[in-house]
Every structure is written in C-alpha cells, then in structure tokens.
Amino acid sequence: MAKAKPSQQKRARERARQERQKEKEQRRQESKARKAASGPRQAGDEDPDIAGIVPGPQKPLWEEDEETKENEVE
C-alpha cells in the first residue's frame, strides 16, 4: 500500500497540470478571437500603450516637480 500513494499523488498532479494547460489554451484562443474581431489599427491611430510619450531625452523628475508646483501657485 505504501507504493500506491505516490502514484495517486502523481496522477493528481498530472491531471491538475493538464487542466491548467487546457485553461491556458482556452485563454489563448479567446485572446486570438478578440484580436481578430477588433481588426487592425488604422495607420493614423496611436498605440494606446505609448500614447502621450514624447521621444527623446526627458526632463529630470525634479525639474518637472518644480514646474508643476509653479503652475499650481499661479
């Protein structure tokens, strides 16, 4: 009987792993369907992940803080 327990535990782990894989595959399929349904972005559309980001060197954070404080005072 001592040998049966590890085997059952292993089967349970394998079943759990297979279920997780199935769930992942379903999520992937749903994601693909959502992306396909939304269609491609237009040429003029801005990428929402980088909206408002200015390319090039950025001002130091402390200078931005000073400017916002000055604008709030005015």
Image (cartoon, grey):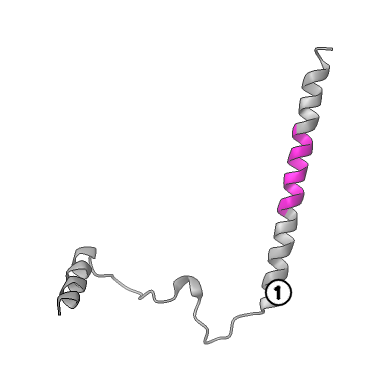
Q: Residue at x 81, y 23 (%)?
A: 7
Residue 18 vs 68, above or below: the answer is above
Q: Is residue 34 left or right of residue 5?
A: left
Residue 8 vs 14, above or below: the answer is above
The x and y percentages for residue 11 are: 80, 30
Q: Residue at x 74, y 47 (%)?
A: 21
* The residue stretch that appears in magenta: 13-24
Q: In the picture, residue 71 is in which quadrant? A: bottom left
Query: How many numbered marks appear?
Result: 1
Q: Residue at x 80, y 12 (%)?
A: 2
Circle 1 sits on which residue? 36
Placement of the C terminus among the 4 image quadrants: bottom left
Placement of the N terminus among the 4 image quadrants: top right
The three-letter code of the residue at mark 1 reads: Ala
Q: How many residues crowd mark 1 within 10 Å: few (<14), some (14–19), many (20+)?
A: few
Q: In the picture, residue 35 is in which quadrant? A: bottom right
